[in-house]
Image (cartoon, helix red, strand yellow):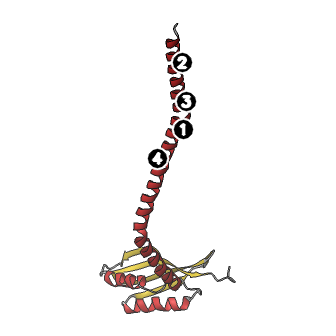
Amino acid sequence: MPFRERQQIAICAAAAAIICGFVLLRYMPLRKGMNSLRQARAAEMLAISKASAESQQMPAIREQLQQLRAEMKNYERQVPAQRELGEFLQKITNLMNEHNLRGQVIQIDEEIKAGELNCIPVSMQCKGRLSQIFEFYRCVQGLDRLVRIERVKLVNDDDFSGEVIMQTNAVIYYRAEAGQG
């Protein structure tokens, strides 16, 4: 084999080795680095767009927070720290009288202590027209004390005069103070 051919083969082999070395040692690591940079950039863009979308929700979240704070103030007012049972019973009696409901019976059942809230079951019974009873319930709902109606039973009176007998089981609450259990 002549010298010139060997020289060309050596030059081609050296060029092939340089190209392989460049591809394996320089190009491939740079390509992997570029791919990881692209992925990092895509992740950052996703985080930015997510943060942008969340920042647009901030006014709605602030409004919700204000509503919750207002509800907490109502909670403090609607669930008193003391039983205030006599005041509540007086209000219920006054509402029944105001709506001309007759045959009033209000009974307090045994108090239930449950952590931070204490419950007082109240049974109410009276007689009147359906419209009077609905107005009574509307007024109970508007009381400044939280009242949960658990059961309502409306029964026609025996002579079908248009009046109904209402029986209701309700619960009122008060907050347990630190010394109470």
Residue 89: image x %, image y %?
A: 50, 89
Q: Which residue is labeled 3 in the image?
A: 21
Tell me the mark number nearer the camera, choosing from 3 and 2.
2
Q: Amino acid at mark 4?
A: Arg
Marks 2 and 1 in Cβ contact (< 8 Å): no
Q: Nearer the viewer, residue 92 or 18?
A: 18
Q: Secondary structure at mark 4?
A: helix
Residue labelled with disc 2: 10
Sequence order check, earlier mark of 1 and 3: 3
Q: Are the residues at dot 3 and dot 2 in contact (C-beta closer than 8 Å)? A: no
Nearer mark to the viewer, of 4 and 1? 1
Above-or-below relation of 36 to 140? above
| Amino acid at pointer 3 | Gly
Identify which residue is drawn at 36% across, 89% down: 99
Q: Is residue 158 above or below residue 44?
A: below
Q: Which residue is mark 4?
A: 38
* First reached walking from the N terminus: tag 3 or tag 4: 3
Q: Are marks 3 and 4 in contact (CB under 8 Å)?
A: no
Q: Which residue type does callout 2 highlight?
A: Ala
Residue situated furthest right in the rendering = 179
* Residue bearing mark 1: 29
* SS at badge 3: helix
Image position, residue 133 (x, y; %): 36, 82
Mark 2 / mark 1, whichever is N-terminal: 2
165 left or right of 84 in image: left
State the separation of the CA atoms marked 2 and 1: 27 Å
Sequence-first tag of 3 and 2 = 2
Foreground disc of the pair 1, 3: 3
The mark nearer the N terminus, 4 or 1, is 1
- Residues at marks 3 and 4, CA–CA distance in whole angstroms: 25 Å
